[in-house]
Structure formats: structure tokens, C-alpha cells
Amino acid sequence: MSQQQLESETACAKVLERIAVCRQSGGKQLNLSSLGLSTLPPEIGQLTALTTVYLMNNRLTALPGCLRDLHKLEWLGLQDNPALQLSPAVLGSDPRNSSEACASAQSILDFYFGRETGQARPLNEVKLILIGRGEPGRRVRCAPCATSRSGRAKRARRGSRCATG
């Protein structure tokens, strides 16, 4: 048996054990973070009292539909599961790095399963790559500041610097 198979079986045993303990105690939180999971067992759908599920830092490739049956679920931590392709705009802030509000479990699941069925709204995201020499304190000319004195004032209050101001 390879090391990877052994780790996978150990993780599966831990998951099933944690689910069983949570089911027996009527627990509201389940932490399955950092176990190297690629899938979730269907038994998770039996934990109807869950309000919080931590699944961060795994290798999840898909979410089971049974998560939608957890009607009391308020928070679902899916950060650091790159194969799910859920952006921070969907997941909300990472609770490990921020005290800001996170996205609701319902909104995450609606987006995920809506995307699977082609019913999710597209995210208006853009990746911007700037090419050129970056120098500390370098000023740029921005169109709003070039045409509006109030634009310069607003940017000055926010601490931005502009070549026109």
C-alpha cells in the first residue's frame, strides 16, 4: 500500500469518526479542515443540526448535493480548495485572516450548484496585469482627475496621488 493510499484511508476514517461523533452529540459544528479530502462522504447530509462546517485547506473537487439539505447551515468554509474554483468574491473573507463578515452558506451553495446547472450569474471579475517599470511614488494621470476637481479632492482624501492634482 502506498503512502498516499494510507493517508487517504486515515483521512476517511477521521472524517467518518467526526461525523459519527457529531451525529451522536447533535453537534452544530463540524471541522473537516486540512485532512486532504477530495470528496465528502454522503453521511454529512445526515447532520441536519449543523450550522457551521469547516472544509478549508483540502483538495475537494466537487460538493455533494446533500449539503443543500442542511437547512440550518449558516456558514461553510471552503477556502483553499482550488479545484472548486470558488473565488473570494463568492466565499467572502477568509475567517483565518479577517474578522469581516463571510458569505452565507446558502449563497455559496446557490452559486456553486447554479454554476453546475448553468443558472449562476457570471462574476464580474477581471485580472489586471500591469507591465512596465514600477517605481515607488510614481504618479499616474487618471481621466477622472483630469476632468473633475471633485475627483481630485476625493482621491486626495483617500490618500491616492495623481499627476493632475
Image (cartoon, rainbow, N blue to C red):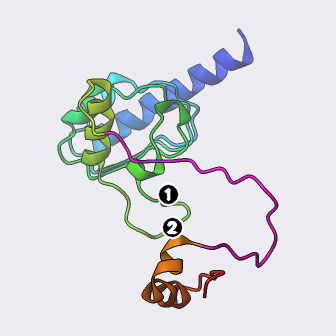
Give the magenta range: 122-141
Residue flagged by tag 2: what amino acid is it? Ser
Q: Secondary structure at mark 2?
A: loop
Asked where in the image residue 134 lies, by quadrant, the reply is bottom right
Residue 126 is a magenta residue: yes
Residue 29 visible in the displayed image: yes
149, above or below 66, in the image: below
Which quarter of the figure is the C terminus placed in? bottom right
146, above or below 135, in the image: below
Query: To which residue does mark 2 refer?
Result: 98
Residue 147 is a magenta residue: no
Q: Residues within 10 Å of mark 1 (few under 14, many from 20)?
A: some
- The answer to whether the residues at label 2 and label 1 have Cβ atoms under 8 Å apart is yes
142 and 24: which is toward the camera: 142
Instruction: Check residue 71 in the rendering and tell me which mark sits there, or answer none.
Output: none
Which quarter of the figure is the N terminus placed in? top right
48 and 26: which is toward the camera: 48
